[in-house]
Image (spheres, rainbow, N blue to C red):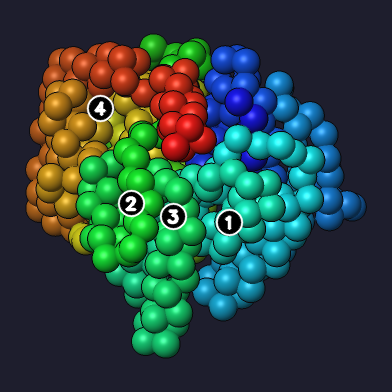
Amino acid sequence: MRLLVVTPHFQPDTAPTGDVVAMVVDALGQMGHETHVVTSLPWYEHHAVADGWQGSPWRTGRHGHGTITRLHPFPTDKTSLVARSLGYLGFSTMAAGAAVGAKGPFDAVLALSPPLTLAVAGWLAAERHRCPLILDIQDVFPDVAIEVGAITSPPLKDLFRHLERFCYGRAAAVRVLSDDLAANVEAKVARMRRPPRIEVIPNPVDTTAPTPTGTDTAYRHELGLGDATVFMYAGNLGHSQSLDLVIEGARRHAHRSDIAYLVNGGGVMADHMARAAADLPNLTVVGYQPPERVPEVLATADVHLVLLKAGLGSSSVPSKAFSALAAGRPLIASIDPGTEVAKVVAEAGAGLAVPPEDPDAFVTAVERLADDPDTRHSMGESGAAWISQRRSPAAVAAAFTALAEDLTAG
């Protein structure tokens, strides 16, 4: 099988999507399949083209068993929705040209969203190469942006919803990460004359990366965290995350030297978190770490935090939750009840799920795990075992292969 992949990020870019797609592409290569990836130059960490990648807006090369084209991402001010939309439009236009002009044949095109404009690029490529389009939905857009207030204009809401329906209508299949996202998309395509096939395929987790077994890491010592029980949020610091829970937890636990909060990441809320940390000695805020240090960073935490605002659990699945479980660490998930991460925590016995944006419930969960190291340890072991059985890159790549072959045969 030969697959054309259109994705906004790819390793060594630091975005979680880049790791996910790279794992699938590498696993496909190990299975004997070939891929051609169209993606951006690395830019995610600082919203600027990374050092060593400047100078050319278009680069081609090889990756594993396949080839890759990297394009200028048109990075812009990450706090401006208009600027970001224009940047995504510029990148998507270049991606469409690269994907349409890629040397075929291909058995299928896999296009990731967001940004939703990449779905249009994928559709044009699928038309050109006469093969089915698989639209890969990592977050349901524009639902998340509307829910957090990033899009408030009624005309813009209508525009993006029309674009969303247009893209779904051109796809042979829509891949989603969970049953919640599947129900969301199914409701939107139900009245289409030829609705796409909806397929639930979870994101893979790297179960092979060596992870320190203990929390006494060099990273912990660098940050001066000592012997405290560390509750870590690692990932994007954006409008979707209820990061004020961490600030409130640090305030309430200012008297407890055995509890420390660590926020590790970047995004539009980074400055807000840094200002809060300046007044809270038990709250540490640091930026993204190099990819080679990620296993050590994940291992530094005693407990990882999943913080998603109310109403977003059916349109977004935080991928960092599963990386934390693979590292053998339990979760406190502040998320809509009954949604994917809450169900995994319960099924795997891998932590505690609490209602979203509920400071009292969050603080109670923190105190429970801070005071019970044996439970933390057993929950971490249970989560790691659950991940190794269900989320390996090989299993996810096999699911993609079966879907593409089924669509081609159909």
As displayed, is residue 246 above or below residue 319?
Answer: below
Could you tell me which residue is drawn at 30 percent across and 56 percent down?
185
Callout 2 amino acid: Ser
- Residue with the mark numbered 4: 330
Which residue has dot 3 on it?
Answer: 237
Instruction: Look at the numbered discs 4 and 3 and tell me whether their residues touch, using CB distance below 8 Å.
Output: no
Quick check: 89 above or below 296?
A: below
Q: Tell which circle, 3 or 2, labels the residue nearer the N-terminal end.
A: 3
**Residue 197 numbered tag:** none
Disc with the residue nearer the chain's start (4 vs 3) = 3
Amino acid type of the residue that numbered disc 1 sits on in the rendered structure: Trp
Q: Secondary structure at mark 3?
A: loop
Which numbered disc flags the more N-terminal residue, 2 or 4?
Answer: 2
From the image, tell me which residue sits under label 1: 123
Residue 215 can be seen in this image: no
Question: Where in the figure is residue 179, as x and y percent of width and height?
Answer: 23, 43
The vertical placement of 363 against 258, above or below, is: below
Q: Nearer the viewer, residue 201 or 244?
A: 201
Cα distance, mark 4 to mark 3?
Answer: 21 Å
- Crowding at label 2, few (<14), some or many (≥20) Cα neighbours within 10 Å? many
- Residue 230 location (% of width, % of height): 32, 33
What is the spatial separation of the Cα atoms under label 3 and label 2, in whole angstroms?
A: 15 Å
- SS for callout 1: helix
Mark 1 or 4: the one toward you:
1
* Label 1, residues with CA under 10 Å away: few <14, some 14-19, many ≥20: many
Q: Which mark is residue 316?
A: 2
Q: Earlier in the sequence, mark 1 or mark 3?
A: 1
Residue at point 34%, 40% (across, down): 199
